[in-house]
Amino acid sequence: MNYFKKHKNLWSAIVKVGLVLLLISFFLLLREGQQIVPAVISKGSRPLENTALWETAVDQARARELALADEDFESLLSGKDFDFLAALPLTSTESQRWFDSGCADSAAAGTCARVSFYDYSDGGTVDGIVNLDTGQVVQSTVHRDARPGASAQVLPRALAIAAADSRVTEVLGDIRMAEPVMGPMSAWLMDDDCREDWCVDLTFAAPDGSGRTFHTFVNMQRAEVARVFYSRARPARASGATVEDDRTWNNGCHEEYGWSVCWEMTAHDGIEFRDATYNNDSIFSNVKIAQVEVYYPSWPGGYRDEIGYAASVQPADGTHVTDLGDGFEVRQLFTEFMSWPNCVCCYRYEQILRFYDDGTLDLHFISHGPGCDDPMIYRTFWRIDLDLDGLENEELLVWENDQWVEAETEMSLPVFESLSPDGEVLITGAGSYRYRWLPRKTDPLGDDEGNLYLLRWNEDEGEGEIVAGPPDTFFPPAQWLTDESLPDENIVVWYVSILNGKKGDPWWCAPEPAPEFSPCDAEMRIEPIVEVVPTATPTAEPTGAGETSTPPTASVTPTQTVEPTATRTPTPMSELTTAVTSTPRPVAGDTAEEIARISGCDNCHLIGDIGEAGKVGPDLSSIGVLASQRVPGQSAAAYLRTSINDPEAYLALDCPNGPCMGSIMPGDYADRLTAEQTDMLVDFLLEQKAGAAPESEAGTGQAPADWVLPAAIILGIVLILIVVFGLLRLRGKRGDS
């Protein structure tokens, strides 16, 4: 007893200090294990649904049963883990391939459908063409690269996987009752298994009222949640008109200004225009948009958007035919949700074809946005199957070494780096027709990009349904590019426009242009190299979709010269382009915070009070301390300046989602930032010392959290051992007494 009384205060103090340190260590452990999103209670009430109007066109259950009843088809799925995706009616163009099997005009008669299953065991889809009248499987095919959209049939699986993940339940509670932002989207992440695996992004309104979007990336093949993160919010925007809940389109044909063309909505490839003639001469067999790819460097990843009646972005507001005075246009809107413009992650596109009385064809695509984050990059994949003077004997000329030369084998061209002095990127021709391809410059800062792919026609290379695939290995049409010969063959031209979002002044293709709107667009003008001599003034009244009118007569006189550069004077490019300024693109902003935001730094990094954690780049909130330790002998200011001007010079070891990746941060800041702006950014970053003790106090300059956590745990354990040892000694002393 004397021993205990003598040391009672000491032991009491030791126990109290030990308990306090243990509590601190537990708090730090919990903080270390927190996700990048707060734990809040879900306030949503609407279940996530994927409404599909096309399901009424085909009996889904019967189509599934017919496919699995076929011995050959069933053998492709035998012993596999698979899900039924959908059964989609064939379009008129698609059905022609199976004419001998009774599938002709199936889109009108509902005769044949494409039935798809996803094979989780080996990856990819197993597809079959089913004649619903005879009950026979006409053909079965395996597409190992296919990464389909998320249909209503696989949605329960995706939701079940997400519901079992604690990161999701902490934020959304019951995910089935959460408030969706978009329908399930086929998506990828460049720094994750979702780069190759089939992954679906489920997006929800953040229940904390911040207006942000909470993303849940579900890896369908591995049955796990790959990643959860927020993308940024935006304030409500005033708009005089919104789209009604009217998911409609109009298939039809139109004859006017010498043109005759038909069109049909597809499941995933937008409107397919087919069988176009000008003055009774064949011009193209079909034109369509295979997909719209959206890429966000801040994730890094994005979506393989598809437009169509069974796609992630569906048609709305009908198909409009408009008289232009010297031609007509066919326009279709595609939109994700009907609450535009007051939505986050809403995709809103327009596909437009214009047909002019001189034989000109104009391909036009508009993205209205806003997308999920910024910066963003849109890529639109047009497929044009020209049939000038019949299917074959087509000629392609490209500008090379200051002259036009014939393309001998399949090839790709960077559109705006391959222009002739007259602004042409390509000349195509056959028989008496020659067409020149004039890409229109639309980027307000002259940062226009795009690619042309010149391919020989082959079966299963985009004529039918075009499936989306992994971003690197399946990039229609790059995966079909070979050394096949082109002269005198049926040629297919792919035009991939690239639209780069801009944040600041000017706003373009960007998610937050408040209070203005900032659509971006890409246009390719395909203009005949002919002289048009009208013999009658067009008098036809505008007609609606599906109606026809009597076309005016006109004579087309081919040029007498064979060399395309000796034809009529081309339309000046100044008349085809908007006013542009020279590159490089300057960055606006008068303060360091403005420069950081407009440059996009906050899209990838957390920097003190700006940006968000959990994105692709490392947290820079303590970089003012850490920068001096990255490169021996180099000052913090020098390190930061080099990292801004040459981001590939140094890579941090750890990023929020794994090892830091190269080629993510833009490499043109040395040209876009003035010396004064760079100095302001460096000074701003040097001030970021959140959670980090000064180097004189911290020794190595590490943030205290790097050593407090293990030290607190170890010290707490030591103190517990001392307490236990002391109590044992106390007990021993009492026994001796």
Image: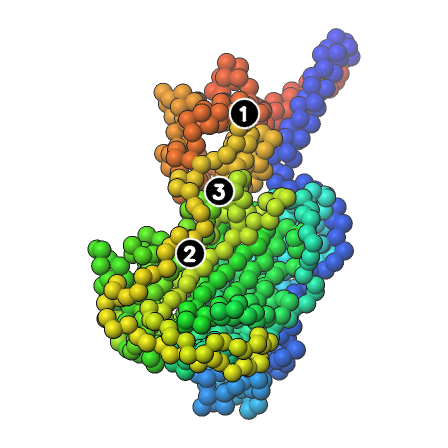
Residue 434: x and y in percent read: 31, 71
What is the crowding at mark 3: few (fewer than 14 residues within 10 Å), some, or many (at least 20)?
A: few
310 or 627: nearer the eye? Answer: 310
Determine whether, in the image, residue 140 is placed left or right of residue 236: left
Q: Which residue is mark 2?
A: 576
Give the Cα separation between the discs numbered 2 and 1: 48 Å
On screen, residue 176 versus residue 589, left or right, reads right
- x%, y% of residue 176? 71, 58
Q: Secondary structure at mark 1?
A: loop
Kind of residue at disc 1: Gln
Of mark 3 and mark 1, the one earlier in the sequence is 3
Colour treatment of the image = rainbow
Q: Amino acid at mark 2?
A: Leu
Residue 69 can be seen in this image: no
Residue position for label 3 = 658
Identify the residue at image location x=41%, y=76%: 534
Secondary structure beneath label 3: strand
Q: Residue at x 35, y 53 (%)?
A: 416
Calculate the distance from the C-alpha at mark 3 to the C-alpha at mark 1: 23 Å
Q: Where residue 154 sits: x, y (%)?
A: 61, 66
Q: Which residue is mark 1?
A: 688
Residue 62 position (above or below residue 602)? below
Of labels 2 and 1, earlier in sequence is: 2
Judged by depth in the image, the label closer to the viewer, 2 or 3, is 2
In the picture, the quarter occupied by the N terminus is: top right
